[in-house]
């Protein structure tokens, strides 16, 4: 299959939208990562997403719409707490899970009675969705288990020849997938952390909390990112918890064993380290989040045997960063006192 590259002009957006209406899948930029979209009401089209990604069938997809007024078309009801969250965080890097009304094909919801809905805060994404006139189911546009794409070329690395096309919208801004909140019960529960933090949400709905559930392998996930391995680079990744001296000792230990070592860390820590390949990913949590997946993919194009990544603070967006790193990691290395 030829994978087309579309620009972001009006005519190109219309062509990409027509591909959706023809039952094909299209990758498009959002403010978080590139999504792999298909008509959420077309079972045949949705099956192509799972096939292209190699995605497990019990892993539900998030439905993207272009305006808050669209949400009510696909859910049974919007509880008061859910409406407050919608009003404050949508459009944006935020997904809300509500009881579905069966308008969406069961392949999207993995047969669950709930559906995750998001409104991207990205002009190209919203123009594209609006041009289709359809709800667009869209997981990240990468092979299942690999780092999510924050650039169009990341999509091509994984999916060229497997999808109909990609809308080239440049690098995404946020860099991590949306925060997912289950609002089907009385208390909103964060199932996947993201750029909208628990602290942000509690300002709007004080009873909200983070899930403390451990997703077992025989259970069906209610949200993407809960059950399966994700974000893994080609080389094994170890998260290093310790100071710069401890970090350098880990690098030196592996190099003595003739391993080529890559390091992913903040700019300030990187200045104190020496390794075979280095990827500085900024200093504050917003910068680190935006560069994280690009960094993980960077090492796929080097000759490193393993990657050592800094353990970042879990304050604010740092919680989402460490959530993704932990899912990508083969192990953690801890400094003992």
Image (spheres, helix red, strand yellow):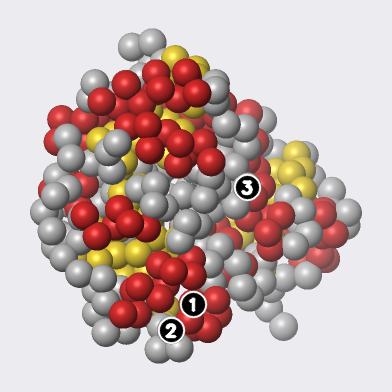
Q: Please, what secondary structure does the residue beneath circle 2 have?
A: loop
Please state the horizontal and vertical placement of residue 32, each as a whole percent of the image.
53, 49
Q: Residue at x 78, y 59 (%)?
A: 283
State yes or no: discs 2 and 1 in contact (Cβ < 8 Å). Answer: yes
Please, is residue 185 above or below residue 18 in the view? below
**Which residue in the structure is indicated by mark 3?**
173
For label 3, the crowd category at 10 Å Cα-Cα, with few meaning under 14, some 14 to 19 and many 20 or more, is some
Image quadrant where one finds the N terminus = top left
**Which residue in the structure is indicated by mark 1?**
201
For label 2, the crowd category at 10 Å Cα-Cα, with few meaning under 14, some 14 to 19 and many 20 or more, is some
Q: Is residue 29 visible?
A: no
Within the image, what quadrant is residue 145 found in?
top left
Viewer-side residue, 128 vs 318: 128
Q: Residue at x 48, y 81 (%)?
A: 204
In screen coordinates, is 197 left or right of 51? right
- Dot placed on the residue nearer the N-terminal end, 2 or 3: 3
**Which residue in the structure is indicated by mark 2?**
205
Q: Which numbered circle lies on residue 328?
A: none
């Amino acid at each position: 299959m030829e994978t087309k590259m579309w620009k972001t002009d009006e005519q190109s957006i219309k062509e990409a939208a027509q591909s959706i209406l023809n039952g094909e899948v299209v990758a498009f930029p959002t403010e978080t990562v590139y999504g792999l979209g298909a008509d959420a009401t077309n079972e045949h089209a949705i099956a192509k997403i799972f096939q292209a990604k190699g995605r497990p069938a019990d892993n539900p997809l998030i439905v993207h719409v272009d305006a808050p007024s669209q949400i009510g078309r696909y859910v049974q009801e919007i509880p008061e707490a859910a409406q407050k969250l919608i009003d404050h965080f949508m459009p944006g890097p935020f997904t809300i899970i509500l009881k579905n009304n069966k308008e969406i094909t069961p392949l999207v919801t993995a047969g669950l009675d709930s559906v995750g809905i998001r409104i991207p805060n990205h002009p190209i994404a919203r123009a594209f969705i609006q041009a289709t006139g359809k709800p667009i189911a869209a997981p990240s546009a990468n092979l299942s288990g690999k780092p999510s794409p924050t650039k169009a070329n990341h999509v091509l690395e994984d999916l060229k020849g497997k999808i109909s096309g990609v809308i080239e919208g440049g690098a995404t801004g946020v860099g991590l997938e949306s925060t997912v909140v289950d609002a089907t019960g009385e208390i909103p529960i964060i199932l996947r952390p993201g750029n909208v933090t628990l602290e942000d949400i509690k300002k709007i709905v004080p009873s909200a909390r983070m899930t403390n559930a451990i997703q077992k392998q025989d259970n069906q996930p209610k949200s993407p990112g809960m059950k399966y391995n994700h974000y893994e680079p080609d080389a094994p990744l170890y998260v290093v918890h310790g100071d710069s001296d401890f970090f350098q000792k880990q690098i030196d230990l592996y190099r003595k064993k003739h391993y080529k070592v890559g390091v992913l860390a903040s700019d300030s820590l990187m200045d104190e380290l020496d390794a075979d390949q280095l990827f500085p990913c900024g200093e504050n949590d917003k910068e680190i989040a935006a560069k994280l997946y690009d960094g993980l993919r960077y090492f796929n194009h080097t000759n490193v045997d393993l990657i050592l990544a800094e353990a970042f603070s879990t304050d604010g967006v740092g919680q989402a960063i460490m959530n993704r790193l932990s899912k990508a990691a083969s192990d953690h290395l801890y400094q003992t006192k």
